[in-house]
Image (tube, helix red, strand yellow):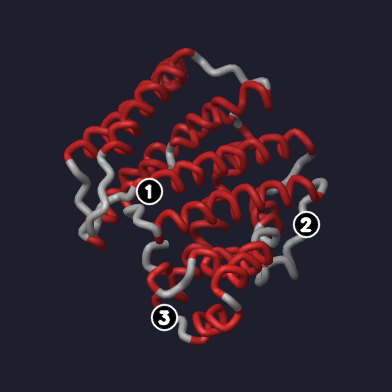
Amino acid sequence: MKVGLQGLSPMLMGALRFAAAALPFVWFVKRPALPWRYLAGYGLAQGLGQFGFLFLGLQLGMTAGMASVVMQTQAFFTLLLAAPLLGERARPAQWAGLSVALAGLVLISVAHGEGPGQMTLIGFVLTLSAAFMWAVSNMVARKASFAGSFQPFPFIVWSSLFPVLPFLALDIAIDGPALVLQQLQSMSINAVLSVLYLGWLATLLAYSLWTLLLKRHPAGRVTPFSLLVPVVGLWAAWTFFGEVPLPLQWLGTLGVLLGLVVNQASGLRNFWRSLRTR
């Protein structure tokens, strides 16, 4: 995302990402046997909502490494939404783990700055909004699993159609048609590769696997595993962009990862117990 945003506006990159994920495949991938509202709801929440806020946050000063950490508040938002919307009761260990993770995120948020290479407050708030929209899309995917049988890959392909035109309309409204056309004509090879990576690997592959997990397991059990994302995100941002988190941000990140361990403690115990029994 950070590489693509060096030559594309946030809204245009969103349109291109989901166009790459949908348009080459809808011609031969059969539409899932689901009401359109689930496809539209997921596409708009996960596409326009989650990535619209995230792309804008990255452009306005959110560092790539810290974005991978802050986005994990989706697990906390998902647990909050799963109780009233899905009737899923969280275990005490889940609440304890997410409370620890939330404390870590608070430490990260207070360590923002306005200098080069530092996380800005507006970037943090926009990324937090993206995490909430991710949680909303988790609710839609879980609801869709109750509405009918479907395969995750076609679900992601067809739902990716819905964010394309809203993203494009927003970009034209913000930047004007002339600037949009100029960006398209001057796309670098890095921007093209970024769009293809985001469309095919980060959307079709990753979210198909994610949706498959949400189909098979309660949302509160699945979403905390995304807390492992910062392990990759922090390393990649440090390696490729030289982003070195502040000491307080490191402490907060440790809190987030510790929250994952606490959250999954009972599940891991049951897993090892079943292995011993076998």
Classify 10 Å Cα crowding around label 2: few (below 14), some (14-19), many (20 and above): some
Between discs 2 and 3, the one toward the N terminus: 2
Residue 107, label in figure: none
Q: Is residue 36 above or below residue 12?
A: above
Going by the numbered disc 3, the residue's amino acid type is: Ile
Quarter occupied by the N terminus = bottom left
Q: Nearer the viewer, residue 176 or 129?
A: 176
- Provide residue 37's location: percent of width, then percent of height: 78, 47
Taking the view exactly as shown, the residue that stands out farthest to the left is 247
Residue at 47% of width from left, 53% of height from top? 54
Which label's residue is closer to the chain start, 1 or 3?
1
In this orientation, which residue lies closer to the viewer: 97 or 116? 116
Amino acid type, callout 1: Ala
Q: What residue would you read off at disc 2? A: 31
Q: Is label 2 or label 3 in front?
A: 3
Q: Earlier in the sequence, mark 1 or mark 2?
A: 2
Disc 1 residue crowd, few under 14, some 14–19, many 20+, Cα 10 Å: many
Q: Residues under labels 2 and 3: Cα distance? A: 32 Å
- Foreground tag (1 vs 3): 1
Quarter of image, res 213: top right
Q: Which mark is residue 189?
A: 3
Q: Is residue 135 visible?
A: yes
- Which residue corresponds to the image point at 73% horizontal and 50% vertical from the top-left? 39
Real-space CA distance between mark 1 and mark 2, rounded to the nearest whole angstrom: 33 Å
Residue bearing mark 1: 67
Q: Residues within 10 Å of mark 3 (few under 14, many from 20)?
A: few
Label 2: element kind: loop
Percent position of residue 104, x then y: 31, 30
